Amino acid sequence: MEGSAEQLRQVRERRWEEVDLLAIYIDGQRFGDHHVISAVGVDRHGTKHVLGIRCGATENAAAVKELLTGLREQGLPTDRKYLFVIDGAKALRAAIQEVFGAEQAVQRCRNHKMRNVLEQLPKDQHPQALNVMRAAWRLSDADDGMKRLEQLALS
């Protein structure tokens, strides 16, 4: 238990001024009765950095804002552009805009999107839907990708 407490203290005290992050992934996980929000940054070399964790669900605006303001207090610059990858929770987007500004790029996590789509389909349609979505996302032309996804939705 002491080792875990020490590791948590180190994460909460780590400074971020000198780390050149390009993307920040924010997600919530459930552990029994507990919700934990985590932020992981990816730098320009592809190295992942655990930025922070907080108790609370991604749907909880106060918990998300606490996580992001904590990162700002640890030196993460808020005056530069990042790609934020989130699960689609409105509280996440609102907190990102409040702490980092409305001009930040936000992308919906593809894994969450696939999971949400598949939950709406019968199991026998999962393989085809997965193949079409993955193929559409590999296309270099966004309009072509949207057309394929729209065809899937209409079929």
Image (tube, grey):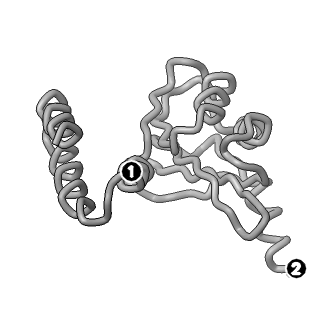
Question: Residue 103, percent across and down?
Answer: 50, 18
* Marks 1 and 2, the one that precedes in the sequence: 2
Residue for point 85% across, 71% down: 5
Name the residue beneath numbered marker 1: 120
Along the viewing direction, whichever of 51 and 134 lies nearer the viewer: 134
Along the viewing direction, whichever of 92 and 12 lies nearer the viewer: 92
The quarter holding residue 123 reads bottom left
Residue for point 46% across, 49% down: 43
Asked if 2 appears above or below 105 in the picture, the reply is below
Local secondary structure at mark 1: loop
Question: Residue 2, percent across and down?
Answer: 88, 79
Q: Quadrant of the N terminus?
A: bottom right
Q: CA distance from mark 1 to mark 2?
A: 44 Å
Local secondary structure at mark 2: helix
Tell me if residue 58 can be seen: yes
Asked if 4 appears above or below 133 in the picture, the reply is below
Tell me if residue 21 can be seen: no
Count up the numbered dots: 2
Q: Nearer the viewer, mark 1 or mark 2?
A: 1
- Farthest residue, direction right: 2
- In the image, is 108 to the left or to the right of 69? left
Residue for point 74% across, 40% down: 60
Residue for point 46% across, 59% down: 47
- In the image, is 144 to the left or to the right of 18? left
Specify the amino acid type for callout 1: Gln
Asked if 41 appears above or below 89 in the picture, the reply is below
The crowd level at tag 1 (other Cα within 10 Å; few <14, some 14-19, many 20+) is: few
Residue 5 badge: none
Question: Residue 54, percent across and down?
Answer: 76, 52
Specify the amino acid type for callout 2: Glu
Name the residue beneath numbered marker 2: 2
Q: Quadrant of the C terminus?
A: top left
